[in-house]
Amino acid sequence: MAQRFRDAFQRVAKQVNSAGGGGGAGGGGGGGGRAAAAAARSVTALALAGGLGYGAYNSMYTVPGGHRAIVFNRVVGMKDTVYSEGLNFNIPWFERPTVFDIRTRPVNLQTLTGSKDLQMVTIAIRVLHKPNPSKLVWIYRNLGLNYDERILPSVMNECAKAVVARYNANELLTKREMVSREISIDLRKRSGYFNVLLEDVAITHLSFSPEYARAVESKQVAQQDAERAKYIVLGAQQEKKTIIEKAKGEAESAELIGQAVKRNPGFMKLRRIDAARDIADIVAKSGNKVYLNADTLLLNLLGDTDDKFEKGVSANKSRWY
């Protein structure tokens, strides 16, 4: 480039010199030639300085933090050296650096697949990945800078479908950690073939078809109804036992009362007195007027009611014996 500037300026200087020699005296022509030569030297010096500045500027490049650089040489092709962060040098025009981002980046994938029992499952996976820093030359030569867009979607899709097909729909929920671990193992193995490192693999979403969701809900409702019915049966059994025990108690109580009456008729008088006391309390506290017979209210404790009752008991005894 500097030589071209020099040649062009020398042609311009010759034209200026010839024009100056034809129009004036010999002394004037010589002065014009010297001025043209000085101008040519100045332009040449400027061209050389510009060329050196251009070469110095393009012979250096900076690799930012979290990045690495590889260099393409026009003579030997891709160089095997991977350049680290900071200031690096290259030969202008002959070499062209390419900077790789080696920081961890996320990739999300959602796919529809089938379980072992042929239930449709929608699964979403999130992967944190980065390129292998020592294999950047191979990645650039075979995959390019957009390596993640070329390999991760297909690999993630295939691994997710392969693992989900090993489990039933209910196992995908109860064994979610195991499913995630198997997907992670398969993805790390497959991506390792392409020199891509995976730092984390996680299942972010897992859902089933609406029909399956309704079936699961119906099953849960049926199980709850069955549990409720079981408790109702247990309650009925307990109530039955309570009634039986209550009946046995009442029978024993009646038998004991009958035996007490047989042995001592005064027992019934005592019971009549207790009943009369209770009735008297109720009548005393009531604001209504009572016009019933005292015998009916069991309040005639001084009349011949006891005699009638004893006669009735004696008659019953004769019939019992």
Image (spheres, rainbow, N blue to C red):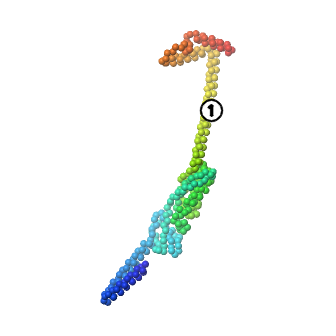
Q: Quadrant of residue 304?
A: top right
Near-viewer residue (263 or 32): 32
Taking the spot 51% from the left edge, 65% from the top edge, the residue there is 145
Q: Position of residue 288 (x, y in %)?
A: 49, 17
Residue, far bottom: 26
Q: How dense is the environment of label 1, judged by Cα within 10 Å: few (below 14), some, or many (20 and up)?
A: few
What amino acid type is highlighted by mark number 1? Gln
Instruction: Work out whether residue 136 or residue 156 is closer to the camera in this orientation and state it.
Output: 156
The N terminus - image quarter: bottom left
Residue at 45% x, 73% y: name it.
Answer: 59
* Residue 205 visible to an observer of this rendering: yes
115 lies left or right of 74: right
Comparing 69 with 216, the one in front is: 216
Residue 283 drawn at (x, y percent): 51, 17
Residue 255 figure quarter: top right
- Give SS at disc 1: helix
Q: Where is mark 1, residue-wise?
A: 237
